[in-house]
Image: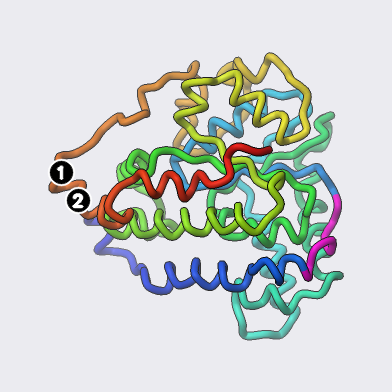
Amino acid sequence: MLKRRRISYDEAASLALFDRIRAVFSPDFLSSRAGSGNPSRRPIFIVGMMRSGSTLVEQILASHPDVFAAGERLDFKEVYQELSASLASREKYPDTVPLFTAEQFRRLGDEYLTRIEPLAAGHTASRISDKLPGNFSVVGLIHLALPNARIVHTIRDPVDTCLSCYSMLFGDDQPFAFDLGELGRYYRGYARLMEHWHRVLPKNAILSVKYEDLVGDFENQVRRILDHCGLEWNEACLSFYQTDRPVRTVSQVQVRQPLYQGSIGRWRPEGGILRPLLEGLGGGNDSMMRSANEGTGGS
C-alpha cells in the first residue's frame, strides 16, 4: 500500500486499453490481414499474468535440446514501436496496427527474428522461447507478424496469482499490483482479453496451461506443451530443475527445485482483507478461471 501511494496509475486508461485491443483485433480485421507475416516456426512465446507459472514452463522448454530459452525479451514490442514511429502517426497501440501494410507485418516478423537469432548463436536449437508475460496484450499482433509461432498461455488460480503478485515488490512498470481491488480488476481485464484471443485466433495458435494441472499431472501436461510446440518427447523436460541456465525472475529459486504443490492455495487472508480482490475479480474466481482458461483443450 505504501508503494501504491508513491506511483501514478491510471486504472481507467489501463482497462480501456484492453477494451480497445479487443475492438481493433476483430475477426474480420484478423482475417483481412492473414498470411502477411514471416512464416518462421522458430519462436515460442510464453505469455500470461505474472506469477502464473510462466518461468516453470520456460524452464521445462529450456530443458529440451531443441529449445533455446531467451528469457524475458522486449524485442517484439520494441520492433513494433519502431515501425509504428515510421508511420508518422499520433496513434498508439492498438490503433496503429490497422495502418500496417502486409509488407510491414512481414518486416515486424523479420526484424524480430533478426534480433533474437544471435541470442542462440552456437546452440543447435530449432526453437527459441520468449517469455514476457505482458505480451498477452499483443498476442493478435504476434500472430499477424509470425503466424506459425506457437504461444503458450500460463494460467494459475486468479486469487493465488493476484496474492502472489501483491506479495512482490515489483517496479513501477507494474503499477496495478499494489492495490488488491485494482489488481483484481486488472486480472479481469486480462482474462477477458485472453478469452478474446482464444475466440478469434486459430485453435492451434495458443495452448493454455493451468499451473494446477501441470503440478497435478506433470508428465501429461509436459507432453501437451511439447506437442503444441512441435517438439519430440524428451525425458530431460521432466527433470527441468537440473537444467543449468540463467534465470532472472523472482521464480529463480522455485525452478531449481523438483515440482511441489506448496504454491497452490498457499496463503489466503481473512475475508475482510480479501474482499476488494474478490470484488475486483467479479465476485469470485470460478468465472475468471473459466474465462482465462477458454480453449485449453486443443493444441
Label 2 neighbour load within 10 Å: few <14, some 14-19, many 20+? some
Residue 202 image point, x, y percent? 71, 52
Q: Quadrant of the C terminus?
A: top right
Q: Are marks 2 and 1 in contact (CB under 8 Å)?
A: yes
Q: How is the image coloured?
A: rainbow
Residue 192 image point, x, y percent? 48, 58
Does the magenta segment cover residue 181? no
Query: Is residue 241 left or right of 12 when viewed as pictured?
Result: right
Picture residue at 40% right of the left edge, 21% below the top: 261
Residue 94 image point, x, y percent? 61, 72
Query: Is residue 121 left or right of 12 when viewed as pictured?
Result: right
Label 1 neighbour load within 10 Å: few <14, some 14-19, many 20+? few
| SS at circle 1 | helix
Picture residue at 56% right of the left edge, 59% below the top: 196
Question: Which numbered marker is on residue 96?
Answer: none
Spatial CA distance of label 2 from label 1 is: 6 Å
Query: Is residue 299 left or right of 120 when viewed as pictured?
Result: left
Q: Which residue is mark 1?
A: 271
Picture residue at 64% right of the left edge, 69% below the top: 26
Residue 87 image point, x, y percent? 74, 81
Query: Which span of residues is magenta-colored?
Result: 32-39
Q: Which residue is mark 2?
A: 275
Q: Quadrant of the N terminus?
A: bottom left
Picture residue at 43% right of the left edge, 60% below the top: 189
Q: Is residue 190 depicted above or below 271 in this figure?
A: below
The image quarter containing residue 263 is top left
Q: Is residue 218 depicted above or below 267 in this figure?
A: above
Residue type highlighted by circle 1: Gly
Residue type highlighted by circle 2: Arg
The image quarter containing residue 147 is bottom right
